[in-house]
Image (cartoon, rainbow, N blue to C red):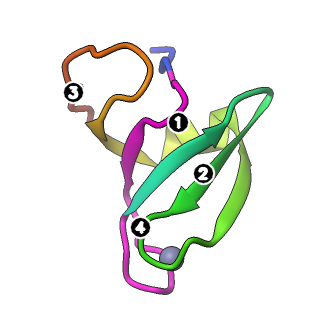
Amino acid sequence: MVVDFHLDDVVRLRKPHPCGSYEWRVVRLGADIGIRCLKCQHRVLLPRSELERRLKAFVSRGGTGAEPVERD
Ligand SMILES: [Zn+2]
């Protein structure tokens, strides 16, 4: 399954950031996707495939207004 990321999507990852937060906002799209931790504002770039592996669920969608999508 190809995951359709959009700017301002909020995603929940499978493992928490060291600060304790599971939730990140998509801030940059490209071959690598930039995400910012909602709690500590730390920003990282991950290859799209890596982010897809770490993704647990979409908390909210930024770009489309589409329904949240649960994945396992
Ligand atoms: Zn954090």
Q: Secondary structure at mark 4?
A: loop
Q: Position of residue 34 (x, y in %)?
A: 68, 46
Q: Counting other residues with Cα less than 10 Å from the Cα at mark 2, is it few (<14), some (14-19), or many (20 or more)?
A: many
How much space separates mark 1 and mark 2, taking CA atoms? 12 Å
Q: Secondary structure at mark 3?
A: loop
The answer to if 55 sits in the magenta stretch is no
Residue type at tag 4: Lys
**On screen, 67 above or below 25?**
above
| Residue span colored magenta | 5-22
The answer to if 16 sits in the magenta stretch is yes
Q: Earlier in the sequence, mark 2 or mark 4?
A: 4
Q: Earlier in the sequence, mark 3 or mark 1?
A: 1
Q: Is residue 3 left or right of residue 72?
A: right
> Which image quarter holds the C terminus?
top left
**On screen, 67 above or below 14?**
above
User: Marks 4 and 2: in contact by CB < 8 Å?
Assistant: no
What label sits on residue 52 in the rendered view? 1
Q: Which residue is mark 4?
A: 15
How much space separates mark 4 and mark 1, taking CA atoms? 13 Å
Q: Tell whether circle 4 marks a residue whose Cβ is less than 8 angstroms from ligand 1.
A: no
Q: Position of residue 66 (x, y in %)?
A: 26, 14
Q: Which residue is mark 3?
A: 68
Residue type at tag 2: Ile
Q: Earlier in the sequence, mark 4 or mark 3?
A: 4
Q: Which residue is mark 2?
A: 35
